[in-house]
Amino acid sequence: MRVFLIFACLMGALFAEEKIAVIEVSGMTCPLCTVAVKHSLKKTPGVLKAKVKLNTRKATVRFRDDLNTSRLLEAVKKAGYEGKILSVTPAD
């Protein structure tokens, strides 16, 4: 039974759908700010890719759909900034 549960969890992770979130990040003032936010997002389990732009003050994050978006906001906050989810869409 234990082996089945482990197998089921692994299969769920392999076949999890991917989503893309756009996050408005307030408080960023320099290129190092974007590096801090990107690093924090990429360390979050379930995040596959993160891109942060200073000129738009937005982060675009590709993640597995089993990751709650509140974890993304926690990662932004951990970097020292405030985030707001603008959109979440299925990845292509």
Image: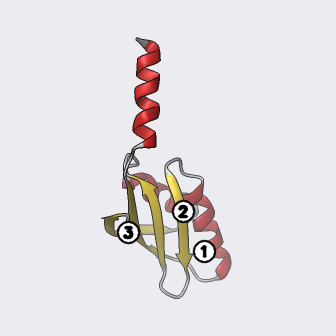
Residue furthest toward the right? 32
Residue contact between numbered discs 1 and 2, judged by CB atoms under 8 Å = no
Secondary structure beneath label 1: helix
- Residue 88 appears at what percent x and percent y? 32, 65
Distance from the alpha carbon under mark 2 to that under mark 3: 18 Å
Residue furthest toward the top? 1
> What residue type is disc 1 on?
Thr
Q: Label 1: few (<14), some or many (≥20) within 10 Å?
A: many
Name the residue nearer the viewer: 18 or 72. Answer: 18
Q: Which residue position is annotated with label 1?
A: 34
**Residue 85 occupies quadrant:** bottom left
Q: In the image, which disc is placed on residue 49?
A: 2
> What residue type is disc 2 on?
Lys
Say which of marks 2 and 3 sits in front: 2
Q: Label 3: few (<14), some or many (≥20) within 10 Å?
A: some
Q: Which residue is drawn at 44% across and 40% down?
A: 13
Comes first in the chain, label 2 or label 3: 2
Q: Which residue position is annotated with label 3?
A: 84
Residue 58, above or below 47: below
Name the residue nearer the viewer: 28 or 10. Answer: 10
Residue 82, above or below 40: below
